[in-house]
Amino acid sequence: YYDFVRGPVHFFMLDTDDREPDGATVDSIQARWLEQKLRESKAPWKLVFAHHAPYTSHTVPDTERMRWPFKAWGADAVLSGFYHVYERLSVDGIPYFVDGAGGTWTSFFGEVDAHSQMRYREEFGAMLVDASDSRITFRFVNRDGRIIDELVLVKKNGTQKASS
């Protein structure tokens, strides 16, 4: 796990494998590291990246051990892969993205998670993210170039608002 800053975005990359020596649960060394780093960050946007999705409507169960209090710690969004679909969920007022539709195959959805706002599995695609100090836009674009989903977050006076 590690972090870096590019422009107005502070990226936090987690190791969500349950064999991670510093742990991959809310009470692990890694989680304490993330909480401290998020608190210390001065970047306008704080994005957490995890391989295993804390929430999903995929047929394979989500990774409950990764349901950390990301918003309370200061994260603006959580992005993950692992499941070969695209999904946007809203949990505790922040977006959670599952973006695993860029591989060699797409998989299936099962029971829809109550937090789910958008699901897509028809075609491969990728997430494009544009950020300024006051605005960040997440777009999922399929390989035909069609925008499938878009979410814009805007910060004014330290308060975040979402629009899709």
Image (cartoon, rainbow, N blue to C red):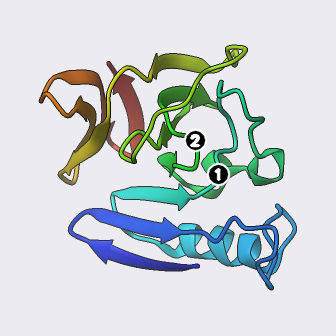
Left or right: where 94 falls relative to 72: left
Quarter holding the C terminus is: top left
Residue 27 image offset from top left, x and y in percent: 87, 67
Residue 8 image offset from top left, x and y in percent: 25, 63
Q: Which residue is identified by label 1?
A: 70
Q: Amino acid at mark 2?
A: Tyr
Residue at image position (38%, 67%) is 10
Left or right: where 89 falls relative to 138: right
Residue 59 image offset from top left, x and y in percent: 70, 27
Q: Amino acid at mark 1?
A: Phe
Seen from the viewer's position, the closer of residues 67 and 73 is 67
Q: Residue furthest left?
A: 145
Q: Quadrant of residue 4?
A: bottom left
Q: Which mark is residue 83?
A: 2
Q: Secondary structure at mark 1?
A: helix
Seen from the viewer's position, the closer of residues 117 and 87 is 87
Residue at image position (81%, 75%) is 19
Q: How busy is the neighbourhood of tag 1: few (under 14 within 10 Å), some, or many (20 plus)?
A: many
Relative to 36, residue 8 above or below: above
